[in-house]
Image (spheres, rainbow, N blue to C red):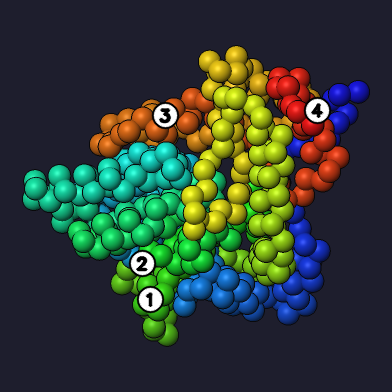
Amino acid sequence: MKSKKTRLYISSPHMSGDEQKYIQEAFDQNWIAPLGPNVDAFESAIAGYCNVNHVAALSSGTASIHLALVLLGVQKEDEVLVSTFTFSASVNPIIYQGAKPVFIDSEPETWNMDPILLKQALEERKLNGKLQKVKAIIVVHLYGMPAKMDEIMEIASTYGIPVIEDAAEALGSQLNGKPLGSFGELGILSFNGNKIITTSGGGALLSNEKAYIEKARFLATQARDQAPHYQHSEIGYNYRMSNVLAGLGRGQMEVIDERVKKRRENFVFYWDIFKGIKGVSFQPEPEGFYSNRWLTTIIINPEVTGIQRLILQQKLEEENIETRPLWKPMHLQPVFKCYDAYLTGVSEALFNNGLCLPSGSNLDKEDRDRIKKALSMFFSFID
Ligand SMILES: *Cc1c(COP(=O)(O)O)cnc(C)c1O
């Protein structure tokens, strides 16, 4: 019987119902191309929602980060300071450019980039006369939680380093009422299948600087010069979003506020059932910080609870309930071991004890009851 239970995913696509209308429009107008009215409308919807002046819809979040680095002139042997507690896509584009990541560990209050370590890394480079090699800072808003942007932006401006916000997981999150993605010189979003809204695959680059986004559009469409023939003076990329997929994005943007509300309700559901349990804690949300709660994660102290998170993961898997450890920090990844890292131990400890729980906006009461029942095999919840 158990194997017949439908699988509960960590985060699965959740359509609004209007997506097909916009996709049909693309077909009716024969705009089956990496540009078109759906792309324009999707870009405006994002710009309005995130309160930025300019947006380019692109083929992925990773492509968006890559173009951001190209725009900031990141080249061979340069350095980019980046959160270590993230998904590898935040870092891979640094390597595409032949540059070197410098990993910055998390602080415990948001789990994101520690401003004190960031300052230390920059100050050391200044003293060694190597500050000019640092071309950018990539700050990640993990699981939707805003990083300490006020502190980070102030440090970045003191040392004159531009900031790229990796808001791939954080559409709909805010810091003191200001949308994430609008703090840095450039921001990026992802619309991959598991994100809060999806175009099946896609991303966006955000900025208040028109010149950046114009240049991004140029580079994303093979860097064609203005000429009657195909002429190129720069290396380009094929990174634009398809007009068909942007139709999905338009339909999804109509319900983004509902999706954020649902994800936050999931968090409250888990918080409520675990609140009496010693040794289980959650990602904090400090005053003024507003997370879309893309994923709800719990930290399980094995000494206090007597529960190993991997055993819990395995048992839930038998109930066809998907859970997953938190991101393994980049400084612990075999492929990135050789790079500089500034560490507090915070991200490693979170990785060792954390589990991401089913957090989709499409979970219903029956799903939640099933999850609670499965978890109650391990924890004695008080009703
Ligand atoms: C998903 C994700 C990305 C990459 O986005 P894609 O659209 O999958 O390329 C980058 N950074 C973070 C933190 C992500 O979670």
Q: Nearer the viewer, residue 150 or 211?
A: 150
Question: In the rendered structure, which disc, 2 or 3, sits on the residue that comes first in sequence?
Answer: 2
The answer to whether the residues at label 3 and label 4 have Cβ atoms under 8 Å apart is: no
Q: Position of residue 220 (x, y in %)?
A: 45, 66
Q: Earlier in the sequence, mark 1 or mark 4?
A: 1
Residue 373, label in figure: 4
Residue identified by numbered label 1: 209
Q: CA distance from mark 1 to mark 4?
A: 51 Å
For the residues labelled 2 and 1, the Cα–Cα distance comes to 8 Å
Give the CA distance from mark 4 to mark 2.
46 Å
Which residue is painted at 61% across and 74% down in the image? 45
Q: Residue furthest right?
A: 1
What x and y, as percent, mark residue 56? 50, 70
**In the displayed structure, would residue 211 be above or below residue 2?**
below
Q: Earlier in the sequence, mark 3 or mark 1?
A: 1
Name of the residue lying farthest toward the bottom: 228
SS at mark 2 in the image: loop
Q: Secondary structure at mark 3?
A: helix
Q: What amino acid is found at the position of numbered circle 2 in the picture?
A: Glu
